[in-house]
Amino acid sequence: MRDGAGAAAAAASTSTSTSTSSPWAWIPTLYFGQGIPYVVVMTLSVIMYKNLGFSNTEIALYTSWLYLPWVIKPLWSPLIELLGAKRRWIWALQFVIGAALALVALTLPGSRAFQMSLAVFWLMAFASATHDIAADGFYMLALPQGTQAAFVGVRSTFYRLANIGGQGGLVYLAGELFERSGSMVSAWSTVLALLGGLFGLLGLYHLWALPRPAADQDSSAGQGDLLRDFFAVFAAFFRKPGIGVIIAFLLLYRFPEAQLLKLATPFLLDSAVAGGLALSNKQVGIAYGTVGLTALTLGGLLGGWVISRVGLKRALWPLVLLMHVPNAAFLVLALYLPSNLALISVALGVEQFGYGLGFTAYLMVMILVADGPHKTAHYSICTGFMALGMMLPGMWSGWLQQALGYVGFFIWVLVATIPSFAITAMLKIPADFGKQVDAA
């Protein structure tokens, strides 16, 4: 999701009109803000609906549909590139997301809470997907390529910290509020209302803190050229060399994780009779939302550092293996059903650390594919295929788990790594892409 100003834009972006132009002043908060609505829509909604008594099949099916805005966001990504500064899109959409979070909190006590909350989650997903387009485009405009590679681990880290705050802190808080009030509806309404207020403050901060790259401006050639430019952006993407392999990679790289992630928290919450670990919300917040995601964050940092030192081509296969092999941790947990929270946390930490390493490689492949003119729109198209690769397998995962049981399902997840390995072998990476060049 990057702007099409090319190398000249990257050079121009080093000149900003604000004193808070250090990447550390805005990259952490920008990607923390990008992660919050996604984790609310795709993860907290799963836990919330599980707490409210819905089946795994219903949860996986309906929440997988919430991926759709991220799948189809390439349809309007050229408009974000062509119309207005990405800086303005970012803070405005953060205010919209904050309002949507507050609206979800208001819908939960109603008689049609499930339908109404899903509708607002749907609207929030559209706002979040659009925010992602602008934020990722802004990242590529405001930093030269070498700095982008160095900070890819940082942006991934703070995106994951949002996941820790969501899956860890907020799930724990919901459990604590439930124990005090006795009402899951009240607990989740309070959590989402607080989160809406936090997002409003984040929008205010970015209104002040984001730098102003010279290349971040309305790039439309005029009203008469807008439609032509819109379609030209898409055509340029599908003319990229090896585009068939690239699209297959974007769809299949996370094929096993797309299914695993939908059933991870239901597995932790389900009773031992149902094959789960019977953890409470607070225990899930600690084991998966805090320990697991901290490990994932560290994996993301390490993966970004490794790529910046040796380049993506040399790092790719080790990172892919380290991403998929630790999925066996869930199979071990399902076979032995341990009750020791520390042991469960270690197993989840190993799996999430590997996922963080492998996902960093995926991000760098998307940056490689988007490089050149129309960065904003082309990166958005990449993430649309990424979301489709998560959405479709996620939709059938709940049904598959209920048909196979948790042990059979986690065996299938390991088998599902084969397409990912196969398509990775077909990918072509330039020798030194992503390797940071030391300053002279």
Image (cartoon, helix red, strand yellow):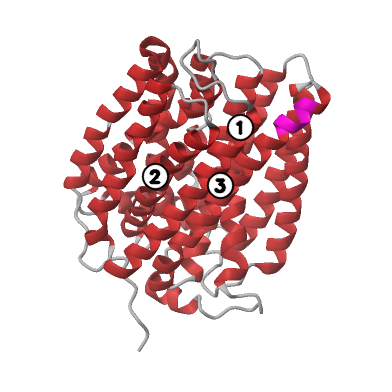
Residue for badge 1:
283
Q: Are marks 3 and 2 in contact (CB under 8 Å)?
A: no
- Amino acid type at image mark 2: Tyr
User: In front: 54, or 291?
Assistant: 291
Mark whose residue sits in front, 3 or 2 = 2
Which comes sooner in the sequence, label 3 or label 2?
Answer: 3
Mark whose residue sits in front, 1 or 2 = 1
Residue 42 spot, x, y in % from top left: 54, 34
Residue 118 shown left or right of residue 407 in the figure: right
Residue at mark 3 to residue at mark 2: CA–CA distance: 25 Å
Tell me the magenta residue range: 174-179
- Amino acid type at image mark 3: Thr
Residue 158 spot, x, y in % from top left: 55, 55
> Is any atom of residue 423 visible in this view?
yes
Q: Are marks 1 and 2 in contact (CB under 8 Å)?
A: no
What mark, if any, has residue 355 been given in the picture? 2
What mark, if any, has residue 171 been given in the picture? none
Q: Residue at x 70, y 45 (%)?
A: 96
Residue 380 spot, x, y in % from top left: 44, 49
Mark whose residue sits in front, 1 or 3 = 1
Residue 311 shown left or right of residue 19 in the figure: left
- Rendered position, 244 above or below 59: below
Q: Residue at x 62, y 69 (%)?
A: 25
Q: For the N terminus, which image quadrant? A: bottom left
Which comes sooner in the sequence, label 1 or label 2?
Answer: 1
- Rendered position, 403 above or below 278: above
Does dot 3 land on a helix, a strand or a loop?
A: helix
Residue for badge 3:
130
